[in-house]
Amino acid sequence: MNEVEWDIFLDIHKDMPRQGSGRNEYTKKAYDMIPPLSHPNILDIGCGPGMQTIELAKLSGGHIIGMDIFQQYLDQLEESIRKEQLQDQVEVMNQSMLDMNFASESFNIIWAEGSIFVIGFEKGLQSWRQFITSKGYLAVHDMAWINPDPPEEIKEYWETNYPDIKTIQEHIEIIKKCNYTLLGYFPLPEDAWWEFYYEPLQNRLVDLRIKYKENPTALALIEEEQQEIDLFKKYNHWFGSVFYIMQKVD
């Protein structure tokens, strides 16, 4: 995207409760697969507005860094931190997952809900490993094929928009290859997509079509967002986001 397109994209996603699939109950389900830790250090990569960041703080009692490159999302997270009075537990950091400069083994847990696609599943597991403590944990969810033989329309869509999409079994093999032990996994149910992401996004698109009615570039981006929603409605039996919880093997 060029600068103009990025500005429109950020306007489309402004003030959304989440920037992808998820709900607090599924963050908790994933966190509960990790053995109890006392006040862990957690890095939430690609945190967006940070709904799960706040939930992790409450679940863990630890110190959380919510990291993202988009300041408007971090501003939302900072507002939530103040509202929940979690200033002593949660901090925000504007930094790219492609260029992280933390010390080795800084975090007991690295968390990434729906953001690992930016760097790629295997590369993320490999490059983030150095920042995880000995026998520490990594929890991510990423797009995957849930059932075999998807219809050609949705297959072509994902091959164009996310060529790195894999089956669950392929993800599991990558986890082993990258020297992690898989503690558990589960596909996010359909409801994880609607209340905090697709429903508010779809409502926002209605207003934005009016706002940008004379802007072909913006209208094209708006229709791309609508296409994603429509294809999910039609084909979510075949694909979805899958949570993987794993432990680093020394």
Image: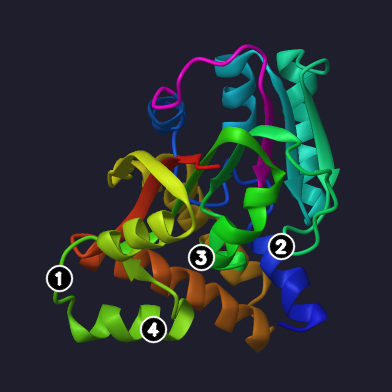
Residue 10's disc number: 2
Residue 225: x and y, percent?
49, 70
Q: Nearer the viewer, residue 153 or 116?
A: 116
Q: In which image quadrant can residue 28 be found?
A: top left
The quarter of the image holding the N terminus is: bottom right
Mark 1 touching mark 2, by CB under 8 A? no
Task: Kindly state the secondary structure of the residue where label 2 is placed.
Answer: helix
Q: Nearer the viewer, residue 166 or 143?
A: 166
| Mark 2 neighbour class, 10 Å CA radius: few under 14, some 14 to 19, many 20 or more | few
* Magenta-drawn segment: 32-50
Q: Is residue 150 left or right of residue 54?
A: left
| Mark 1 neighbour class, 10 Å CA radius: few under 14, some 14 to 19, many 20 or more | few
Amino acid marked by disc 3 = Glu
Outermost residue, front direction? 250
Q: Circle 3 sits on which residue? A: 122
Q: Circle 1 sits on which residue? A: 148
Mark 4 touching mark 2, by CB under 8 A? no
Amino acid marked by disc 2 = Leu
The quarter of the image holding the C terminus is: top right
Residue at position x 47%, y 28% from top? Answer: 24
